[in-house]
Image (cartoon, coloured by chain):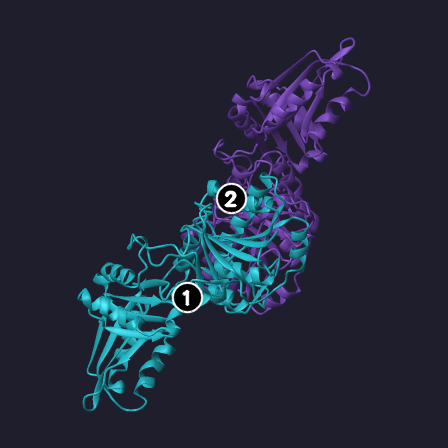
Chain colours: A purple, B cyan
Amino acid sequence: MARIVMKFGGTSVGDIERIKNVAQLVKKEVDAGNEVAVVVSAMSGETNKLVGYCREIAPMHDSREYDTVVATGEQVTIGLLSLALQELGCNARSWLGWQIPIQTDDAHSKARIKEIDTPLMRERMAQGQVPVIAGFQGVGPDNRITTLGRGGSDTSAVAMAAALDADRCDIYTDVDGVYTTDPRIVPKARKLEKITYEEMLESASQGTKVLQTRSVEMAMKHRVRLQVRSTFAPDTPGTLVCDEDEIVEKELVSGIAYSRDEAKITLVDVADIPGVAAKIFGPLTDANVNVDMIVQNIAEGQATDLTFTVAKGDLDRCVAVLKEKKEELGFQDLIADDNVVKISVIGVGMRSHAGVAQTMFTALADKGINIQVISTSEIKVSVLVAEEYTELALRALHTAYGLDAA
Amino acid sequence: MARIVMKFGGTSVGDIERIKNVAQLVKKEVDAGNEVAVVVSAMSGETNKLVGYCREIAPMHDSREYDTVVATGEQVTIGLLSLALQELGCNARSWLGWQIPIQTDDAHSKARIKEIDTPLMRERMAQGQVPVIAGFQGVGPDNRITTLGRGGSDTSAVAMAAALDADRCDIYTDVDGVYTTDPRIVPKARKLEKITYEEMLESASQGTKVLQTRSVEMAMKHRVRLQVRSTFAPDTPGTLVCDEDEIVEKELVSGIAYSRDEAKITLVDVADIPGVAAKIFGPLTDANVNVDMIVQNIAEGQATDLTFTVAKGDLDRCVAVLKEKKEELGFQDLIADDNVVKISVIGVGMRSHAGVAQTMFTALADKGINIQVISTSEIKVSVLVAEEYTELALRALHTAYGLDAA
């Protein structure tokens, strides 16, 4: 017997038939003798519809009212899934964020979970009741509904698993696990049996959309064993996200991520004097623009070129801020380019092995792909290349690191 | 300056443009210096969609989960209307049933309001904030969401008006007031400037759909001045539902209601012995069938015919229950007829004037309309006639009581 949190995303509960299917999956775990808690998202499309309503009325909306509106999506699914479970003879009841309660801070629309009260829920679970919990939502210090930001249901599930001391948190989604890279692009991609928290976190931050970054962070912090599984192929084994110790055969590189959500800005002939970087990036921070990769070319004379990347959606705002301060910053020209892709090679094995970056540079050079920007961390190497090379680069790197399926 | 509760039904908030229109109406009352609280229904169609989901999953659903699901409709509109008001520069915030709280009993899906806490809301209103309150919902003793039954938002509005000691409760709907009868059938119908609680209550119970019966009952009990107004013609004066004392020129008959939601059952040759009525109606009460009009013919010998009416939706169930007990009840035959309409003449003036019923019988006889069943109360006379006579009967009665517009 184990205590399990099962989480189902929007596609998994996208219509009534699918909700009934989810109820079958939950019942199977209950029948196997497990204590089960379920966390669900809104039916696919619902949250977008509700967000659209809010934007239509007020582009700069009060986030407390926004939260009140968008949290209804999950409220509908917990009720419907509880009914579907009851129809199968399963003792189930729905729980809203404020009923548990899932206490959050007051950062409406991107709240963080502070505390979850579980004594009552544990008692009910011990009696065989299945709690069906609304993901994505909590209640703030002002007794108003908060939401955790898009994709927040993964975070709800991990937080519930931590609060309930669950043996496992199974994230059911529309893919059947974590792959070495995107199988739609690289047919030889392999599904990983296990991946470390660190790798999954880098992978999520570098563009892999299987799990939300914050949920992986939280799982790592609380050592929640996360499993990514498919709702539509529930008998296929998924991928376990776990501690490094649990992985016997560690690979040098576990995966290759990519993100098309990048844009590159080059400031030409920036004065090469102390403090200029702070002058440039300060205003961007104030404008809520996140800067990712930064490269400063070696100065020839008094001036240098500075290149950095931002999210595509922030590009226009970023350019506007910089142009406004052109004189103050003293650059000659600003070149913006959003036809770029960031490709990242990730693996905890890098810590102890040299040459991982070199393999990447050689493989890309062999295909004639020019690297525009490079950035590295302890367990990843990222490069920025022209977007048109995405597929070619992914396939070349997948082969170069020996990841291709036999 | 007055304290006003404004209530808007589903059609009034049916889409984003209409919600913005409602915000304008609210702002107008605020700008006029009034303290305003708003109660809203779900966007038209939403509640039906949610009810449909529940039925699809579980025809005999757990009403606690049903309430969790259907209460989301109002939650969406309070958030959206608050945003729309804020866009107009109006200080507004949404309130859910559990946030106020509106305490109800635990009769999920048809709960009754027990208590409403208003100190915080009064304080905010005094500071100029407009509370936007979810109609139709409350919170039960188990801290779970309850709903008040279909049309319950009228009841929420009246209850809020009573709890806030409001000077007036304005019910905005898609008609512009209460008419002497249905203007779609009788073009000469007149809008009433005022109508008494008692008359409105009879009218609502007898089939007029402008206000929900329970909301009128509650308004009468707490002496809340109710006004029925049109969202789409807000400058047209509506109808005030108030105390008899406030109406100077009382008419003998204030209106003529009709209900096609009736079915007639006749039990032929029922034994004419004491206790037989109890034997017949006991099982119907147990089966949750409400019996309305009852007539027992004069007995000729040992047996008599018993005729009564039930709601059309209950007819099949009612017939099944009675047929099962045919031997025990000892009737010869059962005749069911759902081609009937109940027409009611209503007026507090009847209390002191004889001859009102006689005028009705004569007017119908003059048109050759056969009366099947008659029932009377202190302020109304109802008759059951064949459904095909609906229009003819309404027009004849409207003229006979001198209600036709000049």
Task: Name the chain under label 2.
Answer: A
Where residue B367 sits, quadrant-wise, is bottom left
Residue for badge 1:
B199
Q: Is residue A355 visible?
A: no
Q: Position of residue B398 (x, y in %)?
A: 29, 60
The answer to which of B179 and A114 lies nearer the viewer is: B179
Task: Name the chain under label 1.
Answer: B
Q: Is residue A181 visible?
A: yes
Q: Examine the rendered structure and indicate whether residue A239 appears above or below residue B342.
A: above
Residue lying furthest right: A274
x 39%, y 74%: residue = B352
Tag 2: Cα neighbours inside 10 Å, few (<14), some, or many (≥20)? many
Residue for badge 2:
A50
Residue B297 left/right relative to A223: left
- Label 1 – label 2 distance at C-alpha: 42 Å
Callout 2 amino acid: Leu
Callout 1 amino acid: Glu
Residue lying furthest top: A301
Q: Examine the rendered structure and indicate whether residue B338 appears above or below residue B304.
A: above
Tag 1: Cα neighbours inside 10 Å, few (<14), some, or many (≥20)? many
Say what secondary structure mark 2 lies in: helix
x 69%, y 47%: residue = A106
Q: Position of residue B247 (x, y in %)?
A: 46, 62
